[in-house]
Amino acid sequence: MSWAYLAIFCLLSCCAAFQYDLMKLTKYPDDCGFKGTLRLSDVGDSCTGPSRTACQSELIVEFDCYTHDMFRFQVKSEHKRVPMPLPGTLTAKNESTTYKISLKTNPFALNVTKKETGEEIFFADSKMFLSDQFMHFSLNSISHESIYGLGYRNNDFKVMRDGRYLKLWNYDPAGCPQGDGPCYSTHPVFFGKVSARTSRTVLLNNYRAMQIQAHRDRLEYNVLGGDIDFIVFAKNSFREAIESYLEWLPTPQKVPAFLLGWQQSKWGYKTLDEVKKVVEKYESEKIPLDIQYCDIDYMDKYFDFTVDPKNFPMKDMQEFIKDLNENDRHLGLIFDPGIYALDSDYDVYNDLVQGGGVIKTGAGAPYVGEVWPGKTVFPDFTVESTKKWWKKNLRAFHNDLPFSLAWIDMNEPSNFVNTPNQCDYIPGNPNCPPYRIGDLPRLSHNTIPMDTFSSLGSTADTHSLYSRFEGDATIEAFADHPKRMPIITRSSSPGTSTYSWLGDGFANWETLRQHITGHMQHQAFGLKVTGADICGFIGMSSEELCARWIQFGAAFSTYSRSHKASDYATQAPYTSSLLTTIAKKAIRQKYAFFPIFYSVLNTEQSLLLRPPMYSFNDKYIEGLTYQFMLGDAFMACPVIYEGMNSVSCHLPASASPWFDLAGNRLDEYGDVAYIDAPMDKELTVAVPSGRVFALHDVSDDTLTIEQARQTELILYATNPNKAQEQGSFKLFLDDGISVDTKGAELNVDIHVTSNQISLDIISCAGPYKDVKVKELRFINPGKFSKIYVDGKSTNNFVKGNNMVILTLNETVCSLNLIVLA
């Protein structure tokens, strides 16, 4: 270990001796916040040398109340720094709060408790160390609190507080390994369930590299500079804690219908003819397909906004897109931020550099790195001229080649120029800080150096925000386009408003499991549509693994794509009879679920794949990592281990009884159900009591999600149990593609109470105003002898296994009340 790391070890061990007193205190009206100065108290000779001299003797501390259950706590250097952009907007300060502030001045300590319960929701004291290149501080955590988030980590959504280190830094590891990071995205936010009546969301608005040690009683933050800037939400339930954060973030893109379908990609399609044959294979096997991709192979020498004139000629590409669109299919294209720098005839580069909007060295020259085209510069997406340049080129290219999806990759940003040797601490050099993040030899490993600059300041400050700025610029580029343009990013940070995929995953069972937990993480971080490359990007899955991955990913992941690296053969569903069989079933299962996917994603700021504790307060459910609710409709328990032909599914007793969609009771023998899960069948879902939802009545001939949307609806309902009042579902349908659908939407609130279904029509317009409800399948009905539809008695029903099936053939908008009397 070098002297620098010994020094930082000494710093951390001495940190407890550093104490700050609160001076020059100004309290805000109604005790709703304060501002003051933290001054280092006299601690004698308890800590000398580099540690003491690096410490800042005076700091600014500030506490601000915003909404009644949200506050901000900051500790800042007196040296002016470039303020980090907040991911959300702070509203006017609110003097009526649900929390109480307690202050101690000598030494400084802050305790925030919830007024109703007296439970602690935030604690900070003076035992902190702040310098230009390193910060160390702790947050207390109640021992019984369950903490989720702090990612992206290729690990569980729940944080295991066993002393492990969580590494947060946008980093391209060329395949995200299992563990606690760093990986492609940085989200320094956690969601804590303190008790059944108290939960919290805590965001650190700092995007320098950090390593957080998770102990049972505290979280220790080790951050490579910047300021302490916490945004905290104090809520009642775990669900409210997550949803308050999602509502605070920028409103995400409206999800287009086709994005929820099945997608095919591969790095290494060498010609357009090869891509066409992939689509033809899907058609000949009658496997549904909604989006076909072209990776960087379509470009001319990997230059953005070009096509290879020999292998992907423009005219042929245009005809290909036309043919796809005529069959309700779409083309997705990849774009990388690195712009080739050595071709004087490349106007894309010339215009960018002339506008001055590139990442620059300390001397003010464009920084030149290396990515797929060779020597490249990196656009500075914080500069207005760069945003205009990006829009100009994207839209011009789109006019020539009307792709339906923009896939922005390599935006950590990734860089092939590396200095392989590890560097010891060099004071003032942000590439070689006094504290190492995980196994990274240096912060600039696989990315651009930290001593480069954007218009906001040092890359050391803004590196992990690069993809957010690129995503914002891409959204802005299509803001005035009449159709929704989904944007898929690999890298993200708080405030990212695009969608994402989980990056270059390995073909193994661990990555299948992390597809589920990574999905939950990213949705909680605000990325509504997300998912992993099904069957893995790196390596080859066994047929069993690939089948199980399709079984889950094609039916339940918001982003369902088969993608493979150039070194490996495709594992598209048509490559084996088993994969073909399960893909047809799983994709069409998702098509049937479309009303749930589309309605939740476009009307709620919430998770779609919900860990059980998001929806229930039963004991023993907080450790359930790999099963989930789809909205509030039903529970799914995928097969995630080799050799399994059944699953054990925990079904919370508070929502008992539970049934499958055919009316079979699943929890008859207790709250753990053992459900058969053959490899060639779709997964069984478990519907709790007090639920109502709509599914599409798809057939074996349904080949695209647009075709599925033309089918009739089937309403499902289960009676509430004694502890429930009613169940509700919002059905939302529009044309699925237009940005502006105001006045052309079907929006219906559907409720179930005991033996009764009611429909409240919010709006009935647009292309789906005449969509028909084929039938109602009421599971576990109470005793009845007659059924009334809008007051009229009907005998058009049959009783089955714990279910009554009522034939309707009525439009949604014509229905009001169905009563089983």
Image (spheres, rainbow, N blue to C red):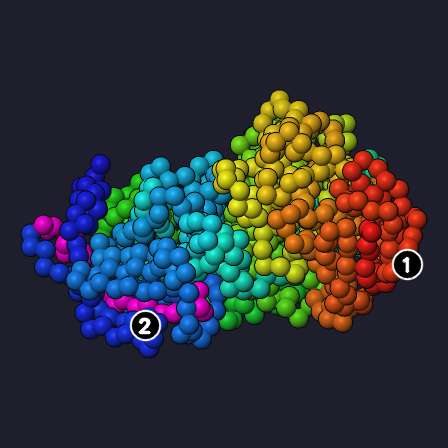
Q: Is residue 50 left or right of residue 693?
A: left
Q: What residue do we see at 33% from left, 38% from top? A: 163
> Quadrant where the N terminus lies?
top left
| Image coordinates for residue 294, horizontal then vertical, percent | 67, 47
| Image coordinates for residue 224, horizontal then vertical, percent | 31, 53
In the rendered structure, find residue 31 and report the number of the disc placed on it.
2
Q: Specify the segment rendered in magenta.
A: 46-69
Viewer-nearest of discs 2 and 1:
1
Q: Are marks 2 and 1 in contact (CB under 8 Å)?
A: no
Q: What residue do we see at 81% from left, 62% from top? A: 816
Q: Amino acid at mark 1?
A: Lys
Q: Amino acid at mark 2?
A: Asp
Can residue 69 be seen by looking at this rendering?
yes
Task: Decide: is 8 above or below 452.
Answer: above
Q: Is residue 352 left or right of residue 668?
A: left
Q: What residue do we see at 50% from left, 40% from top? A: 619
In the rendered structure, find residue 792 and report the number of the disc placed on it.
1
Q: CA distance from mark 2 to mark 1?
A: 61 Å
Q: Secondary structure at mark 2?
A: helix
Q: In the image as oriented, which residue stretches furthest toward the top?
A: 643
Q: Is residue 388 left or right of residue 780?
A: left
Residue 297 is one of the magenta-drawn residues: no
Q: Is residue 766 left or right of residue 418?
A: right
Residue 56 is one of the magenta-drawn residues: yes
Q: Residues within 10 Å of mark 1 (few under 14, many from 20)?
A: few
In the rendered structure, find residue 572 and report the number of the disc placed on it.
none
| Image coordinates for residue 110, horizontal then vertical, percent | 28, 61
Can residue 133 be seen by looking at this rendering?
no
Q: In the image as oriented, which residue stretches furthest toward the right?
A: 795
Q: Earlier in the sequence, mark 2 or mark 1?
A: 2
Q: Which quadrant would residue 653 be assigned to in this image?
A: top right
